[in-house]
Amino acid sequence: MLRDTSGLSPHLANLVNESSLLSDLVRVAAGRYPGAIALTHGSQHLDYAALHGLVSAVASGLLALGLQRAERVAVYLDKRPEMVATCFGSAAAGTVFVPLNPLLKPDQVGYILRDCGVRLLVTSPDRLALLLPVLAQCPELRHVVVAGDGAAPGGAPWTITAWRDFIDAPSRSAHRVIDTDMLAILYTSGSTGRPKGVVLSHRNMVAGAKSVASYLGNHAGDTLLAALPLSFDAGFSQLTTAFHSGARVVLLNYLLPRDVLKAMEREKVTGLTAVPPLYIQLTSLDWPAAIDAHLRYFANTGGRMPRETLNALRQRAPSAKPFLMYGLTEAFRSTYLPPEEVDRRPDSIGRAIPNAEILVLRENGTECAADEPGELVHRGALVGLGYWGDAEKTAERYKPLPNGVGGKAGGLMLPEIAVFSGDTVRRDNEGFLYFIGRRDEMMKTSGYRVSPTEVEEVLYATKLVGECVAFGVDHATLGQAIQVIATAPDGSAALDVAALLAECKRLMPAYMVPHGVLAMAGPLPRNPNGKIDRKLLATRWVEQRDSVDAPATLGRATEAARA
């Protein structure tokens, strides 16, 4: 509920009931709209008063277990109220939440838990059973909270608490937190090696919620469909923008694209945010007419929307406004294209969102002229706090803004840190931005950022390859498909592609499984530094695929094996 402000001046009362910390979004909404539905999960509905009570109970539960300020709380669940309450309750307690993609495999979860020293894990009984071997390698883990039905295993070296007991702790005072403090660590694949933990502050997420809600026009009558994983910045943004506006969020764990359409019709969804591969799948289906009667907007994130898909979406939901967006986990959200500009410039990623500035800079730090390609640089309140425990990679992306660029005046002595995206863009004469390409070798498939070396590490771990290289190739549905070139292991006459792909399915999330594997005789070519020449192999693969003389079976047998 709203705090008692009877003894305060009107100005101070307004400040108390404004949101500066993440948990304030729920608290303030509970005061303004206590009986309005905040979350829907299947047949379960929580109004804002109940959600605020659950968030407060989680905060007390964390404090009762002795968690200290800024200690990490990981959540490994599908989308459900317990996951939402844990994230916002962690914020209310003064700890740091780490939402884990439910598609991750145990080894990947174990890496993240170790990397950021997670102290408490919230998961389900079935997921905990799968995690037990890797949790033994997480020395900083002290507590596991089990949400859902089923017996938790005994004899573990950590305390295991049932959810109902966890949220039954007496109310306690939270740790002192201000808006620039750490709030969350969102793990995203880097251009090399293991996933990187992007550290975000309360200010980052709250400013992002207010900014996005302002241009989407979110209000208390909206119903937003949470189809994206809550471990994504864009997925979690469905919660923050809705709670800032007093809107309702429908949590959806779907198996088939048709499930999304059914939920949109059933729940009378007014706002949908998704990645291009999902939109491509949705446009291949017939849409119930009732969707267009309620859908107010659809928003794109996680890669460029194909023009054909955009046109198909507008045909299926002609009353809905299209918002084409570009974002960086390192800065939460960056640009959007207003709906009224879509017909004029459908290939544009738009201009900066409110309360952010997007610059296009040359390598020497000066601003590019109109239509001159340069690096996209984001400055403002949404710029994150760097990568957890990785000073080198943080210095590569988070850099001081040069004097005289943007709003950085020469007389300011303290540095202003901006995010240098590594993406090449151009800006036209009217200030609209256009994406050109990526400077690194990241692959973007099904809306996920995937590191080539992360794929290669798993391939090598199978012991079914001698040498391997992974790279992304353009794909009409996936955005990019993951292609692998590999040699047989020493002593083997041939590469067993079927066995390799079977192991990939066992060890990788579905979006990371290679779309094709091409067997080659070794050794693979090297660059002058002695490393396998990924760029050369990718270029040759594309040339062979596109060649008139290319074998008709190139990649087909392995794609069939993947399916």
Image: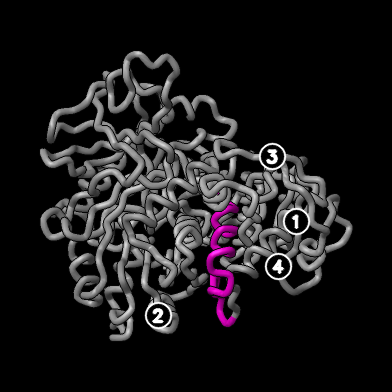
Question: Helix, strand, or loop for circle 3?
Answer: loop
Q: Is residue 458 visible?
A: no
- The quadrant of the image that shows the N terminus is bottom right
Separation of residues labelled 1 and 2 (CA atoms)? 41 Å
Identity, as a three-letter code, of the amino acid under mark 4: Asp
The residue carrying mark 3 is 176
Nearest to the eye among marks 1 and 2: give it: 2
Asked if the residue at tag 2 contacts the one at tag 4, i.e. Cβ–Cβ closer than 8 Å, the answer is: no
Residue 400 or residue 129, whichever sits in front: 400
Describe residue 506's horizontal placement relative to residue 427 as left or right. Answer: right
Identity, as a three-letter code, of the amino acid under mark 1: Leu
Separation of residues labelled 3 and 4 (CA atoms)? 35 Å
The residue carrying mark 1 is 132
Quadrant of residue 401 within the rendered picture? top left
Separation of residues labelled 3 and 2 (CA atoms)? 40 Å
In the image, which residues are magenta? 19-43
The residue carrying mark 4 is 126
- Earlier sequence position, callout 3 versus callout 2: 3
Residue 523, compared with residue 98, is above or below; it is above
User: Quick one: label 1, few (<14), some, or many (20+) residues within 10 Å?
Assistant: some
- Earlier sequence position, callout 1 versus callout 3: 1
Residue 73 or residue 545, whichever sits in front: 73
The residue carrying mark 2 is 268
Asked if the residue at tag 2 contacts the one at tag 1, i.e. Cβ–Cβ closer than 8 Å, the answer is: no
User: Quick one: label 2, few (<14), some, or many (20+) residues within 10 Å?
Assistant: some
